[in-house]
Amino acid sequence: MRASIRKKATVLFVLFFGISFVGFGSNRGSLDPNVQEMLKNDSIADKAKENFNSYAKFVYDELNELQLSFKALEQGLTGYHNLLKRNELVRKDTLTIIDFSKPSNEVRLFIIDLCENKVIHKSLCAHGLNSGRLYPKHFSNENNSKQSSLGFYVTTTTYSGKFELALRLRGMEHSNSHASSRGVVMHAAKYATYDFLERNGCQLGRSYGCPAVPAEGFEDVVKWIKEGSCMYIYYPSRSYKRYSKYLNRTNYLEDFVEI
């Protein structure tokens, strides 16, 4: 039984990632009209969704990372493949998930190697000053809000400045489109460490909206994810999910119809 499950899961992984990493063909970025018509058939659409769910569960099982919630991974994979479909990713090997449904004194940043299906780095991560204290509850895309912004980002270039090494982030949707103008970047901070927790109680310090992480290992983090990889800041927000274009599976269900 175990062997047959693994064989089925491997077929899902190889088939879909073969499509993803090689390319989606001449119709990249939009549904083929014939497939679009096919997906109007509820049974076919349901089968495609079932195949995606099987794929997501396979990846989650392979990761074997209990600190990462399945829902955060499932949504992260959904957006990742939408970004691929739109040809908006340069680096296709990693997916970074920041889970802001968790408190700041717990690990909530995960870098996933999608080629090997393993978590290659995890750490603490601070949220915005006005998003909340231990738990972030308020999110904004507005300048001077000092709040974190939900949604999908694509990493860009690095620079040295106030934070020494920092990684620029490009917000990809309505919830984070002002990331660049707000100066929202990933950077290391002394208030995002276990030492800070020990000295200051049960919560990390907070940023002005940047996902701030420990300095230890930060150079490796930047090396793994800079210049065109997918980052997802997750929170179970109904309003965000309702309007997010990257959580719409219709854009790539064609790739799961025949699995």
Image: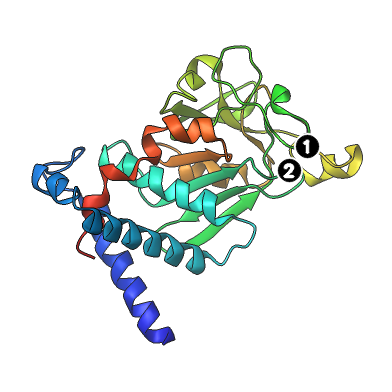
Residue at x 63%, y 40% (from the top left corner): 100
Q: Camera-side residue: 61 or 163?
A: 61
Q: What residue type is labelled 1?
A: Leu
The answer to whether the residues at label 1 and label 2 have Cβ atoms under 8 Å apart is yes
Residue 203, label in figure: none
Where residue 97 appears, as percent x and y from the top left, is 53, 46
| The C terminus sits in image quarter | bottom left
Residue 28 percent coordinates (x, y)? 18, 41
Q: In this view, does 205 lie to the left or right of 182?
A: right
Residue 220 lies, with reference to residue 242, above or below; the image says below
Q: Which residue sits at x=73%, y=49%?
A: 106
Question: Going from the N terminus, do you reach mark 1 or mark 2 first?
Answer: 2
Whether residue 17 can be seen here: no
Q: Residues within 10 Å of mark 1 (few under 14, many from 20)?
A: some
Is residue 251 something that shows in the picture?
yes
Residue matched to label 2: 103
Q: Give the secondary structure at mark 1.
A: loop
- Decide which of 224, 73 is in the foreground and name it: 73
* Residue shown at 21% from the left, 38% from the top: 29
Position in image of residue 114 (x %, y %): 41, 57
Q: Alpha carbon of mark 1 to alpha carbon of mark 2: how far?
A: 5 Å
Residue 171, image x and y in percent? Answer: 45, 27
Residue farthest along the top direction in this orientation = 144
**What is the three-letter code of the residue carrying label 2?**
Pro
Residue behind mark 1: 134
Residue 19 to residue 90: above or below: below
Q: What element carries label 2?
A: loop
Above or below residue 135? Residue 42 is below
Image quarter where the N terminus lies is: bottom left
